[in-house]
Image (cartoon, rainbow, N blue to C red):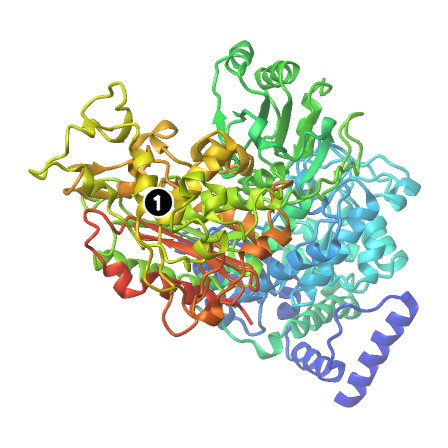
Amino acid sequence: MLRDRFILGVVLLLTISCFSQTKNPLIAKDLTEQQAWVDSIYDGMTLKEKIGQLFMVDVFSRDPKSVTDAVKTLIKKHHIGGLIFSKGGPVRQAKLTNEYQALSKVPLMVAMDAEWGLAMRLDSTYAFPWNMTLGAIKDDKLVEQVGRQIGLHSKRMGVHINFAPDVDINVNPENPIIGNRSFGEDRDNVTDKSVAFLRGMQGVGVLGSAKHFPGHGDTNQDSHKTLPTIPFSRKRLDSIEMYPYKKVIDAGIASIMVAHLNVPALDNRAGYPTSLSGKVVTGILKDSLGYQGLIFTDALNMKGASNYDEPGEIDLAAFNAGNDILLMSENVAKAIAKIEEAYTKGTITEKRLARSVKKILFAKFKVGLNNYEPIAMQNLYQDLNSPEDEVVYRKAMANALTVLKNNQAILPVKNIEDKKIAYVELGDDSGAPFYIGLQKYAKVTKIEAASASDYVNKLADFNYVIIGFHRSNDNPWKSYKFTAREVGIIEAIAAAKPTVLDVFVRPYALFDLKNTTNLEGVVMSYQNSTIAQDLSAQLIFGAIEAKGKLPVSVGTDFKINTSYETGTLRRLKYGIPEEEGMDSQKLNSIEGLMKEGLTDVMFPGAQVLVARHGKVIYEKAFGYHTYTKKQPVQLDDVYDLASMTKILATLPLLMKRYDEGKLTLEDKLGTLLPVLQGTNKQSITVKEVLSHYGRLKPWIPFYRATFDDSGALSKAYYRTRPEENFDLKVAEDLYLRNDYPDTIVKIIADSDLLSRRVYKYSDLSYFLFKKYLEDSEGDDLNGLTQKYYYRSLGANKMGYKPLDRLAKKDIVPSENDNYWRMQQVQGYVHDMGAAMEDNIGGHAGLFSNANDVAKMMQMYLQNGYYGGKRYFSKETMDAFNTCYYCSNGVRRGVGFDKPQLGTAGPTCGCVSDNSFGHSGFTGTLTWADPKTEIIYVFLSNRTFPTADNRKLISSSLRTRIQEVIENAVIP
C-alpha cells in the first residue's frame, strides 16, 4: 500500500513537471528518500497538524520572555509549520530557535527577511550592500558572491528560507518601500542580478523567495499601510513587472511571495488584493507561469491585506487563492479553525490540502530538516562576521561606485603637487571615513561655513573642491534628499571652483539638483557605509578604477547605465589582508609582539604597516610618544627615520640623475666633487661607496670637535639665539656656525681610509652626496625631495624639518639628549651630524609616518612609477637594486640594504634575494619584496629616552614581525 502511494506521488510530481514545462524547485537529489519521508510525516499527522503546517508566525528575539513563550503555545497547541524571525540578536535568536525546534513534532521551517544579510533584522551581524548598490555592478558573479555569503550566514543561523531577492523593478523614484531594495529600473539588469543572487544563495542550501509578485516597483504607496494600485495593462505587466519571475522560475527559485496589491488588469474586483486572488495566484503564477515551488503570502497583518477582511477570513481566502504558506497571520487559532471548517464542509479538499502541506514537507526535506540538528552556539558571532564577508562587501562596493560626470577628466586627481584640495561635508551623517581616506593621499583641508557665500569666500585659495553628501546608512528607507540650503551651497561652490560631488545615498537624491552644469565631477557611492566612503576616496585619487553603471535614470542629466570608467594611477590602495591572499588572524600576531616590545621597554610607541600588491592591509599605532603615557601614538604622527633617509631622500635623487644620464655608477667621487680631487677618495666609485665597499670610515663624531676644553659647547661654534653667521638651528635655543657643514665635508675629505677593502657600513658618503646633489641642482635636499618626489607622491607627512610643516604634538620625540644639546629632541633630527647640517642630512633627517614611507617603497616596487607619474625607469631600479659585490661578502645593493648572505642580517631570512630596504638607528625599518609584493614598515623611537637602550635590537623584534608577515601569506 505504501509502495503504491509512493509511486502515485512520484507520477503526480512528474506529470505536473511535464505539464508545466518547468522544473520543480523543491525536489532534492534523492527523490526516493525525499518522497518516502514526506509521505511518512504527512500520513502521521492529524488534520489540525496538517493545517498548522500552513502557518509561519513572526518572532522578535528582542521581545520579553512572556512574548516569545507565547510562540511555544502555537507550536505545541496549533502545530505551526514555520517561524519568521524579525528584530533581535543572533545569540538570542539561535537559543530561541533551538528551544522552538525541540518542542515541534515536525521540524520548523525558519525564515527571515535578510535581503542584504541578517543585519536587516539582527544586531551584531553583517550588512551587505543594498540591491540598488548591487544593481550598479557590471559583473554578476560578484552579486552571486553576495548571495552566497548571505546564504552561508542564514544557514549558520538555522534559517532555511530567506525572503530574497527582491525582484521588483523600481520604475517609480517616489516608491516609499522598495527603492534601494530593488536592483534598479531596467528589467534585464534586475532579472540578471536576481538570478545571480539566487544562484549564490540557493547554491549553499538556503531557499530563496522572489518578491513581491506581480510587481511592487511602480507605485508611490506602501502596502504595509494601504493597498497600492498598479494601474497598468496586462501587456505592460508581462513586459516589465512580471518579466523577472519567468526567469527566476527557470533558474529554480524555491518560493515566490505574493504582494498585497490592487491590479485591475489581473483581477478587476475593486480593491481586491492580489494575495487573495485565485486569478493571480493560481491562474497566473501556477497555471500560466507553471510555477511549482512554494507560494507565500506577504505578511497578512499588513494593511494591504488586513484592511480587506477579518482575521481568519483573510487566511482562508489566501489559502483558497492558491497560496501554500500563510505568513504572519493576525490570529492563527481563528485561521486554523476557519480552514478546518472549510475542510469539513468539503470546500477545501484533501487533495488541495495535501498539495500545499506536501510542498512544505518537500521543502523541509530539501533544507535538511529530515536530519535536523540544533544551532551550534560556539563561535556564532565570529562566523557571522568573518573577514570573507568584508572581502565580498569591499569587492562588490568597489565595482558599484559610479562616475556619472567627468568633465575635463577631473577624476582621478592628477598632479597632486599642483592641487590645493578642500573637502566640504554636507548631510546629517558622518563623512569622517571619507575625509580620513582622502587625507591618506594628499593634504586635504576640511572647510566649514554657515552659508553658501561663506563657503565661497573660505574656498578662495583652493583649486579643487570635493563635496561629500552623507546621510544615514542605517537602512535603505532613510531620508536621502538634499535640503534647499545644501543645494544652494553646491551650486555656489561649483560655480566658483572645480568641484567633484560625491553622493553617499540613493541616486534619486540627484533629482533635487536642478542645475548640475557647473559640477565637473559627480560620483555615485550609493551608501554611507565606512567601506563605501573609504573606497570612494580611493577612487577619487585613482588608487582603484571606477567600474559601476547607474542602475536607474535621474532626470535628463543622468540616464540609466551612465558610466565613466576611470583608470588607475597606481597609488596605494587600502583594504584587508584576505583581499590580497593573507591571513588576518596570523597578522594579528603582530599585536602580541608589539605588546612584548612595549612591556619589555624596547620603545614607548610605534607604527607598523604592511602592504601587499599595492594595498595597505595592516596599519596600526601602538603605545605612546613617551613613557609618561600621556599622548597615544596616532597613525598621522611622524617619527625620525634616521638612516632610512638614505633610501628615501638621497638615493632617489641620485637615481633620478642616473636615469637622466647625469650620473653613472662608475663615476668617481673626485669627478663629482672637486673638493675630493687630490684626496684619497677621488678614485672611489659611486657604486663602491653606495655598496659600503669604498674603505670609508663608518662614522665620525663631528659634534665632539665643537666642545671647548672644559667640556662645554664652544662659543666659537654656538649661540643661544640666531646671529649673523650663526643661524643653523640644531635644537631649541641652540644655533651653529653657518660654515660648519663645509667643515664636515673637509673633515671627511681629509679622513683616512680603512687599511683594506672590506664591507663596512658608513654614513660618510651620504654627507658627500648631499653636497653633490645640492651643488648640482641648486637647492637643498629638503627642497629637492619635495620638488621631485614627496609633493607629487602625496607624501605630505614626509620631509625634513617637520616643525616647519607640522604641529609639534604630532612629532614623536627621539631622545632626551644629555651629552650635547641637553634637551628633549623633538622635531629636530636625532643624528648629530645631520643636525649640524641644518637638520637636512643625506644620511638622516627625514621624518614621516608609516603610510608615506609605504608610498615611496611602493614607487620602488613599481619600478619608478606611482600616481600616474614616471619617476625613473625599471632599468634604473634594477641597476640600484643589484648586489654587485655579493661574491666578496658584501650583501648591499647600491644604496639599498639587501638580505643577509649568511645567517645574521637585517631580515628574517625569509624574503627573496631581490628584496630591499633599510633600517634606522632610532628603531625604524622598511622592507619591500618584489617577489611577494609585500611592503613592511616599522617606526619607533627606541632611542627615547636614551639611545643606550638596545633591547629592540637584541630582541630581533623587527625581523620577528617580518617573519610573521611572511608566514601570513595564504599558500
In the displayed image of the protein, which residue is found farthest to the left?
710
Using the rendered view, name the quadrant where residue 204 is placed. bottom right
- Whether residue 430 appears in this view of the structure is no
Residue 238 seen in this snapshot? yes
Instruction: Determine whether, in the image, residue 480 is placed left or right of residue 770.
Output: right
Q: What is the quadrant of the C terminus in the image? A: bottom right
Residue 404 in the figure: left or right of residue 487? right
Give the residue type that dot 1 points to: Ala
Q: Relative to residue 342, is residue 465 depicted above or below? A: above
- Relative vertical location of residue 965 with respect to residue 413 in this rendering, above or below: below
Q: Is residue 815 left or right of residue 920?
A: left
Total labels: the figure holds: 1
| Residue 256 image offset from top left, x and y in percent | 74, 56
Residue 32 against residue 444 in the figure, above or below:
below
Q: Secondary structure at mark 1?
A: helix
Res. 496 image quadrant: top right
Using a 10 Å C-alpha cutoff, classify the residue at mark 1 as few (fewer than 14 neighbours), some (14 to 19) or many (20 or more): many
Mark 1 = which residue?
A: 749
Image location (x, y in percent) of residue 94: 47, 63
Q: Nearer the viewer, residue 468 or 268?
A: 468
In the figure, is residue 820 to the left or right of 67? left
Foreground pick, 593 / 685: 685
User: Percent position (x, y) of residue 558?
Assistant: 77, 29
Q: Residue at x 50, y 14 (%)?
A: 458
- Locate residue 113, reporting x and y percent: 61, 52
* Residue at the front extreme, as displayed: 678
Quarter that holds the N terminus: bottom right
Relative to 898, residue 545 above or below? above
In depth, the one of 913 and 492 nearer the eye is 913
- The residue depicted at 70 percent of the width and 42 percent of the height is 567
